[in-house]
Amino acid sequence: ILFSTQVVFVKMFLQFCISFLQCIFAIVLAWHGSMCEDSRCTSHHSSLLQGKSTQCKHELQLPSVSIVSNGSMITKKWFQTMDILAISCDSFDKDTNQTFGRAQGRKSHLDNLFKVCEWCQKYKVAFKINSVINTFNVDEDMRENITELNPVRWKVFQCLLIDGENSLREAERFLISDQHFQVFLERHSSISCLVPEANQKGRKDPSKSIFDVGVEEAIQFSGFDEKMFLKRGGKYVWSKADMRLEW
């Protein structure tokens, strides 16, 4: 009986790993699809990602499904299986958004942001905002809009160079000093949901691939700092069933 139980456990564990890798692969495909200009291609990958979100919640029974998106392809169907939705928004100025490519054709990124926020309120999904502070938005005052949107967390990042990702895209013109970043944080210090991302090296090095070095070694190069993680409030209630979402 013990041997049989062990075999069943191993099979269940392998199935979980396979399903998890399928989800990761689907997410990569969906991200790649978002770069496609063909609306049919983009819609297909968006549907694929939404399906994997359902799989994570119902088949794998993960306690929390969190998605980070620009919000352009989010539909109401997504909210059936999400716990947390984080939308990237670097500016509340239309012209500034155009400057760093935060545009959705004829659609307004900001109009879509507020629409998605309303959906989060309606379907009781935790709403977060991620902002990267750079040369073009460091002097902006976002307090009024952030207060109106009322996210559970507003993560604010300082624009950094990342080798192999943005280091060859003239990213230097977006960089700001630590002092300028601190001024931005002080301007928004009254926002209780603000969670700043500390910058200690002035850059971020990408981790090694898990396919080359394995998961354990890759984690060592991920830049994860447990003390800093806890200090900035990284440990919080992140399952929708345990949240008290009030707007």
Image: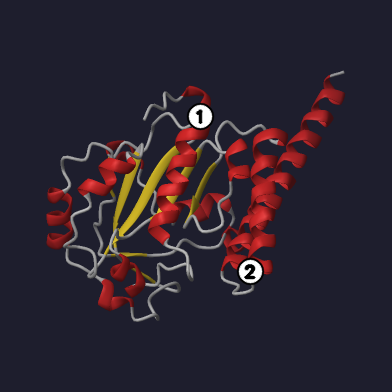
Q: For the residue carrying disc 1, how many other residues have a C-alpha within 10 Å: few (<14), some (14-19), or many (20+)?
A: some
- Indicate which disc residue 168 carries: none
Q: Is residue 235 left or right of residue 156?
A: right
Q: Position of residue 65 (x, y in %)?
A: 56, 39
Q: Residue at x 63, y 57 (%)?
A: 46
The residue at which mark 1 appears reads as 240
Which quadrant of the rendered structure holds the C terminus? Answer: top left
User: Quick one: 31 or 104, which is closer to the camera?
Assistant: 104
Q: Is residue 106 left or right of residue 184?
A: right
- In the displayed structure, would residue 172 be above or below residue 10? below
Q: Is residue 116 visible?
A: yes
Q: Residue at x 60, y 72 (%)?
A: 36
Q: Is residue 41 left or right of residue 188?
A: right
Q: Position of residue 191 (x, y in %)?
A: 21, 40
Q: Position of residue 20 (x, y in %)?
A: 67, 46
User: Which amino acid type is shown beneath numbered disc 1?
Assistant: Lys
Q: Secondary structure under badge 2?
A: helix
The residue at which mark 2 appears reads as 39
